[in-house]
């Protein structure tokens, strides 16, 4: 974000941060495809918190 703020000539900017990999899940995965998707979510989740 800092690079965007420095590069853009405009002072007013709006950023949206979206958590696309949730830390918690409502249901337990029921098959291997769901397990794979959940494993991918865990691998790529934000680790800065």
Image: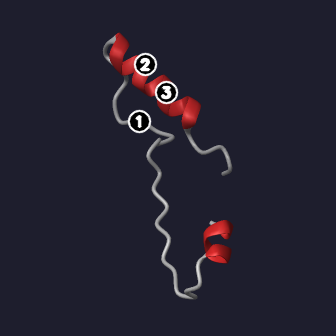
Residue 23 is situated, as x and y percent measured from the top left of the image, at 51, 40
Q: Which residue is mark 3?
A: 40
Looking at the picture, the colour scheme in use is secondary structure
Mark 2: secondary structure = helix
| Residue 8: quadrant of the picture | bottom right
| Residue 18: quadrant of the picture | bottom left
Q: CA distance from mark 2 to mark 1?
A: 14 Å
Please state, as top left, top right, bottom left or bottom right, where the N terminus lies in the image: bottom right
Furthest residue toward bottom: 11
Mark 1 and mark 3 lie on one chain; the one further toward the N terminus is 1
Q: Which residue is mark 1?
A: 25
Residue drawn at 59 percent across, 84 percent down: 9
Q: CA distance from mark 1 to mark 3?
A: 13 Å
Q: Are marks 3 and 2 in contact (CB under 8 Å)?
A: yes
Q: Which residue is mark 2?
A: 36
Vertical placement of residue 6 versus 31, above or below: below
Vertical placement of residue 28 versus 9, above or below: above
């Amino acid at each position: 974000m800092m690079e965007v703020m420095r590069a853009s000539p405009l002072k007013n900017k709006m950023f949206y941060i979206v958590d696309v990999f949730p830390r918690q899940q409502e249901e337990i995965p029921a098959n291997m495809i769901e397990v794979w998707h959940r494993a991918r979510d865990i691998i790529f989740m934000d680790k800065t918190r």
